[in-house]
Image (tube, helix red, strand yellow):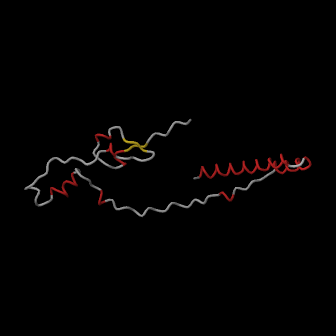
Amino acid sequence: VRIAETSRKALYVAASRIECHLRVLVASPERQTALLAECLSLQVSTSHLNVTYHAAPEGSGCDTSPVATFPCQKSWLQEQYEDESWYKDAPTTTCMPCEVCSNFDCGQHYMLRGDAANVEAYDRETCCTEAPSPAPT
């Protein structure tokens, strides 16, 4: 936003000066010299384009404990199966994870890590890495 604000101000000043010079071009010959002098000394105010930047509000926090574990993690297996009274009579087979990183959408400015197909997880911190910045053109 700060870059856009600076750019917007530059464009506004340039457009104001162009408008002034256009008035010189269409004016009668008697007025052109005086109008040009006005254009050359024109001070363009951009204060109406100032943006007020407020401090970002603090996050309200997020309880991630309900989703802290997911299928096939040891703690999840313990909670969902191994601690149940029926587990000794009906044990489960090897757990197959629901997701691997290769199915995760990292979103903008991130990309899947190179070994994503072999990583059993489903979160940005584990599955993704920061994407390289594009080369300047």
Q: Nearer the viewer, residue 69 or 104?
A: 104
Which residue is depicted at the point 11% across and 61% down? 85
Which residue is depicted at the point 60% across and 50% down? 4
**Residue reaching furthest left?**
89
Residue 98 image position (x, y, % from top left):
25, 48
Numbered label tally: 0
Report the quarter where the C terminus lies. top right
Q: Which of 19 and 63 is in front in this view?
A: 19
**Residue reaching furthest bottom?**
60
Query: Compared with residue 61, is residue 132 higher up or lower down, i.e. above or below?
Result: above
Residue 80 image position (x, y, % from top left):
19, 57
Residue 106 image position (x, y, % from top left):
39, 46
- In the picture provided, is 54 more to the left or to the right than 23? left
**Residue reaching furthest right?**
30
Query: Compared with residue 34, is residue 59 higher up or lower down, i.e. above or below?
Result: below
Residue 87 image position (x, y, % from top left):
11, 56
Q: In which quarter of the image is residue 53?
A: bottom right
- In the picture provided, is 30 more to the left or to the right than 92? right
